[in-house]
Image (cartoon, rainbow, N blue to C red):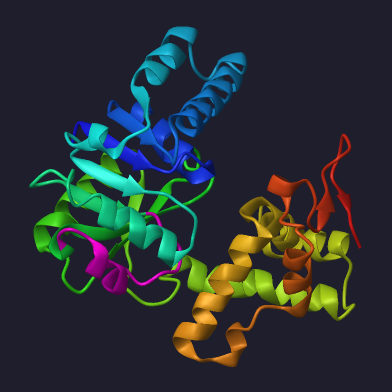
Amino acid sequence: MKIVGVIGAGQMGVGIAQTAAQTGHSVRLSDISLELAEKGKAGIGKSLARLVAKEKLSEDQAQAILAAITPVGELAAMAEADIIIEAATEREEVKLKIFESTASILAPSAILATNTSSLSITRMSRSAPDQSRFIGMHFFNPVPVMPLVEMIPGLATSDDVIIRTKAFGEKLGKTVVLAQDDPGFVVNRIFVPFINEAIFVLGNGTGSIVDIDAGVKLGLAHPMGPLELADFIGLDTLYEIMMVYLRTTGDSKYRPAPLLQKYVEAGWFGRKSGRGFYDYSGEKPTPTR
């Protein structure tokens, strides 16, 4: 695979685009407008500049990576892509519209992949141009740093597409694990309820934000506390994922913690909104409870 199309120039999309460009691929990065796609590339430029400052990349390497990424405003520019990766928001109705829009531009042998952390691949494949060439690729944030990709075939995904997708993931420098098309797949099915439970513990007054995060980091050897990580992921995203689990399984153990719902209703989404379980307006994050 030489040409990679990425639909969605948000946090995940730009991470995927940067990773693909760093590993020798030509990237077409799109969003709902060319302006947003260009903004996404500018963000990649800032990320690369930090790596140059830390002497992890040379200036020439950074410029070569940037040169491999082309912001585009129309999906038609992805007609030559060997794989198109949708990296839009974790809302099924948004993703389905994107899949439908690729019908006229998806090359005959190209793969259409979705970067989802919870949604059914088989169900969404009904909106894809070819169910046999549709697959899930769950990247982890930040994409250039995290070494894992979950690969999730749908019921109709062909063996050839599974083989080619795994090879592509490995070419990106990732370890690819196979997960079945079950709500949350492997990693998030285990870890998102873990974070939700930490929010229950906070809401019940069992521990403070600082003590919960310190306890998990030191007691379980996690690099980040669950509430710190929740802010990093986005509380709105976590809420949506828990609701998917609840609706799909009907199991009440997946109900979102009431405090999580309150924070989302308040617009306190974490780092991206400047406030979540921590307030990010100062030099250092400070607990909000």
* The quarter of the displayed image where residue 138 is located: bottom left
Residue at (22% x, 32% y) in the render: 3
Q: Which residues are magenta?
A: 115-130
Magenta-drawn stretch contains 126:
yes
Q: Quadrant of the N terminus?
A: top left
Residue 278 lies, with reference to residue 91, above or below; the image says above
**In the image, residue 85 lies at what x, y percent?**
32, 47
Return the residue nearer the eye: 267 or 287.
267
**In the image, residue 153 lies at what x, y percent?**
24, 66
Q: Is residue 221 visible?
A: no
* The quarter of the displayed image where residue 252 is located: bottom right
Magenta-drawn stretch contains 118:
yes
Residue at (37% x, 77% y) in the render: 182
Residue 88 lies, with reference to residue 180, above or below; the image says above
Left or right side of 223 for 94? left
Farthest residue, direction top: 60
Residue at (62% x, 69% y) in the render: 239
Residue at (67% x, 73% y) in the render: 196
Q: Is residue 81 visible?
A: yes
**In the image, residue 76 lies at what x, y percent?**
24, 36
Return the residue nearer the eye: 129 or 45.
129
